[in-house]
Image (cartoon, rainbow, N blue to C red):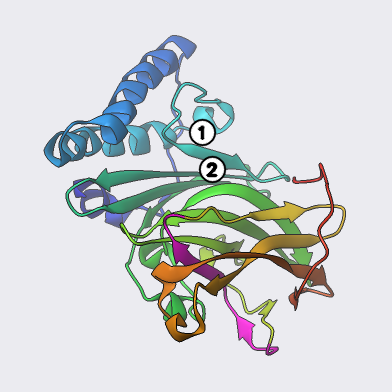
Amino acid sequence: MIFCLLTLGNLVANSQKSILTIDSLISSEKLLKSLGDSIINGSTDFSRNGAAAEFNPRFFDLLANPETFNYPFDSIKTVSILKSPDGLMRIYTWIVPSRIEGTFKYYGVVQRINIKTGEMKLIGLVELKSIPEEAELAELKYDTWFGAIYYEIIEKNIGKNKYYFLLGWQGNDRLTTRKLIDVIYFDSWNNLTFGAPVFKDETKKLKQRVIFEYTTEAVMLLRYEKKKKMIVFDHLSPSSPSLKGQYRYYGPDFTYDAYHFKKGFWNYRKNLEMRNSNDSK
């Protein structure tokens, strides 16, 4: 979208301090809510893209104000908003669907507080379409983002660095859906990176992130069990062994696997015994 092209040069610039009144915030939120609803519920791709062309730059400009870091934006249901447990990062993700193509475009913004200076940095995320098998092994930046809607954030310290692990959803097309476990960290210059070689799969191979793909007709469990230090998920398999690798035929097979966090790595665990648990956070 136009939003990404016009703002790319300013994506990682420190935000300028300005004063926002609560009345102006409420007014902006009402307009953004209306535009966000049109992005999802518009009757045509033309109307949805038109709403996005107005929503995206308005929302980006608003988020450049540090005063918005703690503002809830409760009424904008079309945007997923997560705040890190340490209170230093906020990540916003949203989609623009295409009914004609059955696909989605993903947009994201990160607000990051510099713990040393107290200044806020605004980072726009630019989606780059990539093959999941390649993306699992790649370190990505703000302009090569594997787009997703994030719904849970997990904070872990590994060595001297802090990592934010994200559980996300990606509607791929009319045939398959994806879920993923991604990770964000910031270097000593406060630059953002997606991916870290901390996921050990069933073969002990290290991955930068984990991506699951399955039929759009299925629902997949992917959640964090805090007390157990595990990310639990449905094991996916094809409806027939002859369909291996054709992910539109994959779905949960009523067994569960997990990634267990220990000594700085997420270690794959197979055939997890699941019991009723309310610990899904």
How many residues crowd around disc 1 within 10 Å: few (fewer than 14), some, or many (20 or more)? many
185 inside magenta stretch: no
Identify the mark at residue 66; answer none if there is no mark: 1
| Between 3 and 214, the one nearer to me in the picture | 214
Labelled pair 1, 2 in contact (Cβ < 8 Å): yes
Residue at x 27% of width, y 52% of height: 4
Q: Nearer the viewer, residue 65 or 228?
A: 228
Label located before the other in sequence (1 or 2): 1
Does 233 sit above or below residue 205?
A: above
| Residue 5 location (% of width, % of height) | 22, 54
Question: Where in the figure is residue 280, as x and y percent of width and height?
Answer: 75, 46
195 vs 197: above or below:
above
Q: Among all residues in the image, which is located at the extreme right?
A: 227
| Residue 120 horizontal side relative to residue 253, left or right | left
Image point 28% across, 45% down: which residue? 97
Rounded to the nearest angstrom, the CA distance separating label 1 from label 2 is 6 Å
* 140 vs 14, nearest the viewer: 140
Image x and y of residue 225, in percent: 78, 53
In the image, what residue type sits under mark 2? Met
Q: SS of the residue at dot 1?
A: helix
Part of the protein shown in magenta? 203-217
Please indicate, yes or no, whether residue 169 appears anywhere in the rendered image: yes
Locate residue 259, reporting x and y percent: 73, 69
Which residue, given by chain and number where applicable, does mark 2 sit on? Answer: 120
